[in-house]
Image (spheres, rainbow, N blue to C red):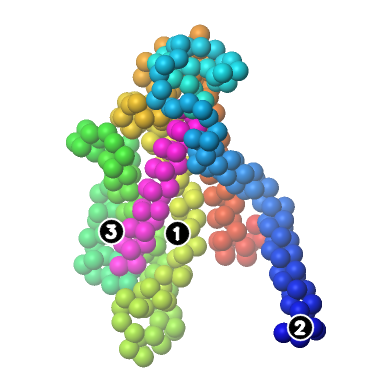
Amino acid sequence: MSVVEAPLQAAVYTKKERSWLQTGLLLARKYPLGTFGLACLLFVTFVAVFAPLLTPYSPIDNNFSVLQPPSAAHPLGTDRGGRDVLSRVMYGGRTSLTIGAVVSVVGAICATMLGMIAGYFQRWPDYIIQRGAELLGMMPNLLILFMFVFAFGPGFNTLVVAMVLPNAFGASRVIRGVILSAKQGQYVEAARSIGAGHWRVMMRHLLPNVMDLVIVGITIRIGGVILAEASLSFLGLGIPPPEPSWGADMGGQARMYFRNCPWLALAPGTALSLTVLGVSLFGDALRDHLDPRLRREGH
């Protein structure tokens, strides 16, 4: 490398770094609520991931006095079982975020595959997938969750399967509509003319057309999944005790102590509200940014 080339490459790298920073600042200025939502989501995720380092107590350790008010040793007090509330709130974020992320990602993958198969092949695959979506669409999601929990018992795997099933079939309709339009494009006909198979056409030429919808769908559904898990845990049908869960800590026998010990409800309720709010605001901003129709309208 010559002496002249080194400063030029350094200037190029500096320009690229500044452009990324400027892009981030422009997006933050354009979507302030989305930026706030992302900050909330990152904060909750950071606390959940590093919970073992941020709190000295185990979420299931019940060696403390019951219903202690907030103090220096227990900033959010203790619950009816003598467990540290702050520890349970931090570890409860792991449960909610894990279920929300797994259900949303797996559901998006299943919805994408179902929608692509229905839109590309049509005929009997399309008929079966659409009738399945209509059948599940007639039943409320909570009813499906109750049926799975009563049939297979509460647990992580039961919740994931019960939430993925309706989400996958419901979202597949949107993917199907995009595929029906995209497969008429000339680039698809050109790929077929040179001998590309069905799998290659779907993965290389049709899948990029729906990736924006998939990404937005994942972010938007996380909040609903977290609320659904909290609702089931509130009723005692979610993650079985003593595993920490925001919904479980606000339900069951804990409700009898809320009037005299409000920190039992405020701590997990605030964490749940902050997480769902952050996901919703960030998902809306991401949808506005990735949706070409909204960009053309000047939103």
Q: Judge left or right: residue 148 versus residue 296.
A: left
Q: Residues within 10 Å of mark 3 (few under 14, many from 20)?
A: many
For residue 5, the mark is 2
**Do we see residue 224 in this rendering?**
no
Of marks 1 and 3, which one's residue comes earlier in the chain? 3
Front position among marks 1 and 2: 2
Front one among 43 and 237? 43
Whether tag 1 and tag 2 are in contact, CB under 8 A, the answer is: no
Q: CA distance from mark 3 to mark 2?
A: 60 Å
Name the spot of residue 190 as percent of width and height, x first. 41, 87
Residue 245 falls within the magenta-colored stretch: no
Quadrant for the C terminus in the image: bottom right
Q: Report the span colored magenta.
A: 88-117
Whether tag 1 and tag 3 are in contact, CB under 8 A, the answer is: no
Q: Which residue is mark 1?
A: 214
Q: CA distance from mark 1 to mark 2?
A: 43 Å
Q: Which residue is mark 3?
A: 130
Of marks 1 and 2, which one's residue comes earlier in the chain? 2
Q: Judge left or right: residue 230 versus residue 10.
A: left
Front position among marks 3 and 2: 2
Q: Residue at x 24, y 56 (%)?
A: 131
Front one among 199 and 52? 52
Residue 112 falls within the magenta-colored stretch: yes
Q: Is residue 204 above or below residue 222?
A: below
Q: Residue at x 53, y 36 (%)?
A: 53
